Image (tube, rainbow, N blue to C red):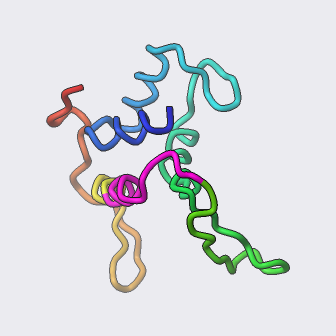
């Protein structure tokens, strides 16, 4: 399912569209619920561990981490993961200005553009 979620996102489905697709296929959430939350899908799309890399916190200071690359066999390629992160940033309607101010973009992404699955 992880591969499918990444593929669907790269093919243009929104997080909401992925939730609908999972529901139509009768696929339960990781916690066994009938429906997936937006948070669960977004979390799946941003978990680097699916590439085989693991971020490990430094004991006593969780804000510092180091990356253990190729820790285990990945479910998706690092290239696919990176492509999804770039696509998520491009679709985001949040923009951070040089001075750190956060604003909403005037234009929103539409998952209906060019989606053929």
Q: Position of residue 115 (x, y in %)?
A: 20, 32
Q: Position of residue 99 (x, y in %)?
A: 38, 85
Q: Please tell me which residue is depicted at 39% across the width and 58% down the height of the picture.
A: 85
Instruction: Residue at the far bottom: name it.
Output: 99
Q: Please tell me which residue is depicted at 41% across the width and 38% down the height of the picture.
A: 15
Magenta residue check for 43: no
Q: Which residues are magenta?
A: 73-86
Count of numbered circles on the image: 0
Given residues 1 and 110, the one toward you in this image is 1
Q: Does 8 sit above or below residue 26?
A: below
Given residues 99 and 92, the one toward you in this image is 92
Given residues 48 and 69, the one toward you in this image is 69
Instruction: Residue at the far left: name it.
Output: 114
Q: Please tell me which residue is depicted at 26% across the width and 48% down the height of the picture.
A: 108
43 displayed left or right of 18: right
22 displayed left or right of 43: left
Q: Quadrant of residue 16?
A: top left
Magenta residue check for 83: yes
Q: Position of residue 60 (x, y in %)?
A: 85, 80
């Amino acid at each position: 399912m992880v591969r499918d979620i990444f593929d669907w996102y790269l093919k243009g489905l929104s997080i909401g569209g992925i939730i609908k697709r999972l529901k139509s296929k009768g696929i339960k959430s990781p916690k066994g619920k009938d429906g997936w939350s937006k948070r669960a899908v977004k979390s799946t799309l941003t978990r680097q561990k699916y590439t085989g890399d693991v971020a490990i916190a430094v004991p006593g200071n969780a804000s510092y981490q180091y990356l253990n690359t190729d820790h285990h066999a990945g479910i998706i390629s690092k290239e696919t993961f990176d492509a999804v992160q770039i696509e998520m940033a491009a679709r985001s309607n949040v923009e951070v200005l040089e001075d750190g101010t956060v604003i909403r973009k005037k234009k929103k992404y539409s998952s209906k553009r060019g989606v053929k699955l």
